[in-house]
Amino acid sequence: MNCRAELARWLTERCTCRFGEARHARDALIAVVYDTCCAPAGVGPAEHLLVTKYLAVTFLADDAHDRPPDLEGMVRYLTTGQADDGELVRCFSALVEELRAKAHDPTRFLRAVQDTITHRLREREVDARTVTWDEHWAIRRHTIAVAPYVWCRATARDLDRSETVADALRESGALALASEAVARANDLASFPRESLPTPGLDRPLSLNSVLHYARDLGDLDTAVTTARAAYRTTIDHLRTALHALRQARIAPAAEQYLEILTSTVNGNLDAVRQLNATRYPDSARFLDDLPMVPVITK
């Protein structure tokens, strides 16, 4: 199966935007690169396609081509089950129906998506010129959408998604730190683009930690150096959290989530580097020598 071609077809069938097939072919390429890099070892084609559908939905919810995405339609679907005619909700509702048709319970995944959408709407309300660091990370750890990606893969694999597992991921700090690590890497890659006004608005829409450092420090080069150091610190803290997750007595689920979180963070760094010529132009120099998460062995 050609995952990229199948994903592009799936997106185009539900298209309502003016950019049509070209946009969705690009999104399909980016989604396939991401999941190829981020997936744990041994992922089959069916799981790969399903998870790339979620990634493509994430891009529809995140990327503003001519105006900000219609997140209110997602809120309506998530709270009432009523799907409107926009392509974002069309694609997301089709993915949820597919999960249910395959007897995968999407409850935990849906909660994570709703949390992400709620924080993306909150992000639109804050002023990047005055937002505090506490407010910044209270939003950014959610808008990066690592949690839905993890729960989507766990749902596709029918892994244990009980409250016990969710509590362990939260209490260990592993999921929050994995989200922060992915956000910090992506911020380094995307800050040139995200310093510009969002299409349809007079200001940037996304919080970006590099730009926040630049605001506080008054110098972009110093901000990049500081952001790179912060990424290294986050990886160190994540290593400790992953060890705590292993000790959380949720075996065998602990090992499976360790693998997913580690491959997600490391794979994200690989994916961003591979997308240097498309989604993140001229970003490779900001990512040089950033560390990977050490793979914990028994």
Image (cartoon, rainbow, N blue to C red):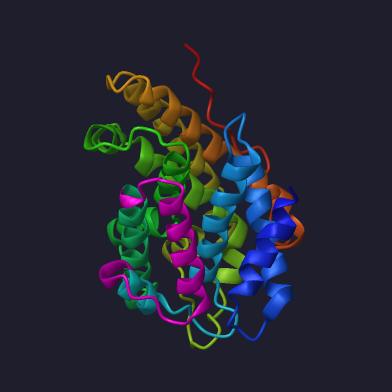
Give the vertical position of 58 relative to 127 (above or below). Answer: above
Tell me if 287 is positioned left or right of 173 in this view.
Answer: right
Please tell me in which quadrant of the rendered image residue 8 appears: bottom right
Q: Position of residue 118 (x, y in %)?
A: 31, 67
Q: Position of residue 149 (x, y in %)?
A: 46, 49
The reply to whether the magenta stretch includes residue 165 is no
Q: Position of residue 245 (x, y in %)?
A: 34, 26
Q: Is residue 130 visible?
A: no
- Considering depth in this image, is 51 or 292 the residue closer to the camera? 51
The reply to whether the magenta stretch includes residue 94 is yes
Q: Which range of residues does the magenta coloring cover?
A: 78-107
Tell me if 95 is positioned left or right of 160 in this view.
Answer: right
Give the vertical position of 229 relative to 73 (above or below). Answer: above
Q: Main secondary structure of the magenta part?
A: helix
Tell me if 148 is positioned left or right of 114 in this view.
Answer: right
Please tell me in which quadrant of the rendered image residue 275 appears: bottom right
Q: Position of residue 200 (x, y in %)?
A: 52, 88
Q: How many numbered markers are drawn?
A: 0
Residue at image location 68% in from the left, 42% down from the top: 288
Residue at image location 50% in from the left, 42% down from the top: 231
Give the vertical position of 230 relative to 203 (above or below). Answer: above
Tell me if 168 is positioned left or right of 142 in this view.
Answer: left
- Considering depth in this image, is 157 or 148 the residue closer to the camera? 157
User: Furthest-top residue in view?
Assistant: 298
Residue at image location 22% in from the left, 37% down from the top: 163
Q: Is residue 153 visible?
A: yes
